[in-house]
Every structure is written in structure tokens, then in C-alpha cells.
Amino acid sequence: MNPLLKKNVPLPLYYQIEEYLKQKIEEKEFEVGKMIPSERELSERFEVSRMTVRQAVTNLVNAGVLYREKGKGTYVAEKKIEQPLKGLTSFTEDMKRRGMTSSSLLLAFDVIEAPRDVRKKLDLSEEGKVYCIQRIRIADDKPMAIETTFMPQELLPHLTEDIVHGSIYQYVEHDLGMAISQARQIIEARAADEEEAEYLNISPHSPVLHIERKSFLAQSVPFEVVKSTYRADRYKFITDIDR
Amino acid sequence: MNPLLKKNVPLPLYYQIEEYLKQKIEEKEFEVGKMIPSERELSERFEVSRMTVRQAVTNLVNAGVLYREKGKGTYVAEKKIEQPLKGLTSFTEDMKRRGMTSSSLLLAFDVIEAPRDVRKKLDLSEEGKVYCIQRIRIADDKPMAIETTFMPQELLPHLTEDIVHGSIYQYVEHDLGMAISQARQIIEARAADEEEAEYLNISPHSPVLHIERKSFLAQSVPFEVVKSTYRADRYKFITDIDR
DNA sequence: ATTATTTACTGGTATAGACAACTATAAACC
DNA sequence: GGTTTATAGTTGTCTATACCAGTAAATAAT
């Protein structure tokens, strides 16, 4: 039996091959700029058809992890300036990448009538109910941010506090099968008000970084509005731009 | 013979199908949100195998033109939220998009030895000389930001004050033929110091948005480091993210 | 030695078919 | 009428194979 891939498992073979290749690259077994095994060799090694290997490799090429050269081979791409906040990252992921431990303190979990600005941003009708989830985000045991999330109730009728304690993004993508595909963020500097100062354990009027994110599902359906207030002394926002 | 696709032609069939689908969408024959013909139907219509159709459709899905729903069909995606600050924008372009007039006040145009942090960020050797260009950026006749740009002298040996008064980006890309392809920005909130407060015409300790941008040429050669300090009451940074 | 040619590799394109998973509708049942 | 059950249609995954086109190195011809 072939121990490399698990068959009769809900994970597609091509996906497992993707993970295998990414891991080998991570472990430096496949080096940057060097050729990876040919598609035919991989298909023999994994005992799958070459088309299946191709599907895996094509995905990684699209993701910028590999690049192909016709007649020569497939190579490991240089890392773009070390992968930053590309893609949508949750607070948890974000902190992990920064090498910090993270936790949360749930301040509120309510279903309310959406405030005017939120209703507009989420394209809701008159009586649009939304979840209002307020959390203090903690990194390395010190408060990092206050985060208030608004999500239409109709999109997630069965959201519970338990789920909120885990990863909402993972719940939405994995359990509900909805893909969050796009977001716009508005970032500004402000002076902390009394309440923010208290929660964040800083002096009033200290500068804070305010980030408002509006996320969309695959079909451009507005999915959430998140308003975050970060301690300016602890948090910098990093973004990469490609032409 | 099938008139829809040209066989015995160097254009791959899947590519011709992509073009066909894009054209039908353009012509509104396939409407936004509506289902396009199923993969099996397309494969019969074009007299190709379903895998070939799939390759075409997959490419368009990756490009965001279509989206699939398992068990239901493949649909035409809405056009993405109107193109925002995607790509690198100069201050001038940025203000233009915000509907403001812009101008600049040149404070300094020098060639200096790079400060330690800049030398490191630009990958310069010991005696790396850099241009140091300091400007007050003005929008609608009021100061918006202080901007300090550092660029290696060796990359632009003939930079003049005149060019700085125009668009440096245009000079680099159009006249020198170098492509700026990537950038990383670090955004943080700060309190304005005395000097910044004076230049920006705000009170000291007011919050300001500090943005540091490091741009790269096509081959990952560091090209510039720009440090900007924006008035928080006048400027918000907007960024879009795609998965 | 230099130059063609062959050969063996690479990825690129395409076929024809199979079964699984999911969805919506129609039909059968109670 | 309301519920369950088939059924047909969709995309998702995968196989086994074939031939094309580009690359590079070994081989043969000059």
C-alpha cells in the first residue's frame, strides 16, 4: 500500500499532493530555484495518474509557489517578500505570524438591529438583524485591540458563542462552505477615547490604529463589517502591493 | 465541420473556449449571476471533451470571471468592486482619485550617505549614497502629509529637481524603462512631534498616520524607501484584498 | 574539433470515460 | 396537503492514454 496518500478519505488526492509539495518546500528538501520531481515521476511515486499530479502542480503554480518551464521542468519559486498579510487573515493567524500567542475576551454576543452605517454597508433591508460580537483581542497576555464584528443573521442562522470562541472564518469556510473572497479595509489613525483607553490599558488620547474591514463572499455578497481599534504602540499594519 | 473552434491552429482549444465565454459575457448573452451552459453541454457544442471545457472554465474561475456551485452550475460573477488603490499610486494619483487637487512644497533635495536603517532596507553597501527628497504634500491647498523619499543614487544617476517636481514614477518607468513591480507598506498610528505638527498645521501630539513604503523593481531590487506622515483628520488609507 | 542528428527527457494539450457528491424537481406515498 | 423517495442534471475527482513541442545531452557524421 502507498503510505504517502490516504485514499478513501474525503481529502482529494490532488490536495494531498499539494500539501506534500508545500511541506517539502518548507523543509527545504525542494530548494528555491531547483527543479521538483517531474510530473511523471510524481505520478509513479504517488501511484496516481499524471493528470492528478498536474492538477496539484497547477494549483501551486497559480498560487505562485511553483513555476513551470516547458521542456525543462517545474521549479520552486522564490518566496515573495516573505508572505505577509496577503489574503484575509484572522486576528489569530495574524498574531501567529508575528510570533505571538493570542487569546480573546468576549465582551458581547448579541443579535441587534443593525446601526444605520452597518445596515448600509451590509446591504440590509429595514429590519436587518445582525450579530454584534465585541471582543478584546489579547496578544502575549496584553490587550492588543478591541474588535466589533457585525454579520447578517440571515447568513449565519446558527452562530453560537462556542463558534465565536473558535475561528469564525474556519466555521464559515469549512462548515458552511461559503468562501470569503474579497475585502476592503479602511485604516486611519485616531486618539483613543476613554472607553478604548480603559480596555486597551493605555492613556486617553494616545494614538490608536482604527481599521474597518468589509468582507465579501464569493458572489460579492457583503458578509461582515469589522471595526477594530489597535494599540498603536503594539501594532503595525503591513500590506503588500503587486502591480 | 464545427465552425465555433478552429482546430489545427496553434491556439489551444481551451483558450478559444475561454475567449468565446468572455465574449458572450461581454455581449450580455450570458448575464451576470445567471448560469452558463453546463460543462457537458459545452463539450457537445464545441465537440471537445469535457476535460477541455473544464480547463477553460477553471481558468475563468481563477480569473474571477465565473464561479461554480457544485450540483447547480457555473455562473457569471459580478464585476469586482470598482478598482480602488490597487497597484502603486503616487500621491498625485491618490489625491486625484479622491477628487482633490494636489501640489507639493520641496523642503530638501540632497544626496547623502544613507542612514543605517535606510541602507539596510535598500541593500546598500557601506558608502551607499542616496537621494533624500523631502516634500510637504498639499491637497486642496491644505497640508496633507510630509513625505521623505530615499532612492539609491546609482539607480538614478541623473535625477534632478525638475524631475522631482513632476512625477518620479513616470520618469522611472517611462524614461528609464524600469518597472516598479512590488511594494510593502507598514502603516502605523503615532502622535505628531513638534516638527511634524508645525509642517502639517496641527497641534502637537495629534494622531498622525505614518506609512513607510519600500518599493521593488521587477527583479526584486529595492528601489526606494518612502516615509510619509499623514494628517489623521484628513487621510484614510484604503486597501483591498483578494483571496 | 565541430557540427548535425538522434534520443530521452520535460511540460502542454486533449480524449473518453467513470464514479462521487450535491441540488432541484418530479413522482410516489401516506 | 404534506412528506418521502426516486431521478435527472450539475460540478468534483480521477484514470489511463496519446500525441505535441520544447530542452539538453549523448551520439553520429563531417
Image (cartoon, coloured by chain):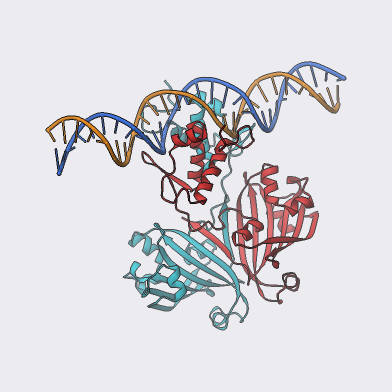
Chain colours: A red, B cyan, C blue, D orange
Image height of D27 relative to A173, above or below: above
Counting from the top left corner in percent of width and height, residue B103 is at: 47, 72
Q: Residue at x 45, y 72 (%)?
A: B118
Q: Residue at x 52, y 51 (%)?
A: A26
In the rendered structure, the answer to whether residue B7 lies left or right of residue A221 reads: left
Q: Residue at x 77, y 45 (%)?
A: A157
In the rendered structure, the answer to whether residue B126 lies left or right of residue A193 reads: left
Question: Camera-side residue: A60 or D29?
Answer: D29
Work out whether residue B149 can be spotted: no
Image height of A155 relative to A134, above or below: above
- Residue A211: quadrant of the picture: bottom right
Q: Residue at x 66, y 58 (%)?
A: A91
Counting from the top left corner in percent of width and height, residue A31 is at: 44, 50
Work out whether residue A220 can be spotted: yes
In the rendered structure, the answer to whether residue C17 lies left or right of residue B180 reads: right
- Residue B133: quadrant of the picture: bottom left
The single residue placed furthest to the front in the displayed view is A1
Counting from the top left corner in percent of width and height, residue A95 is at: 63, 61
Say which quadrant the N terminus of chain A sits in.
Answer: top right
Counting from the top left corner in percent of width and height, residue A155 is at: 73, 45
Image height of A117 relative to B17, above or below: below
Question: Camera-side residue: B152 or A8?
Answer: A8
Question: Camera-side residue: C15 or A60?
Answer: A60
Tally of numbered discs: 0
Image height of A174 relative to A122, above or below: above
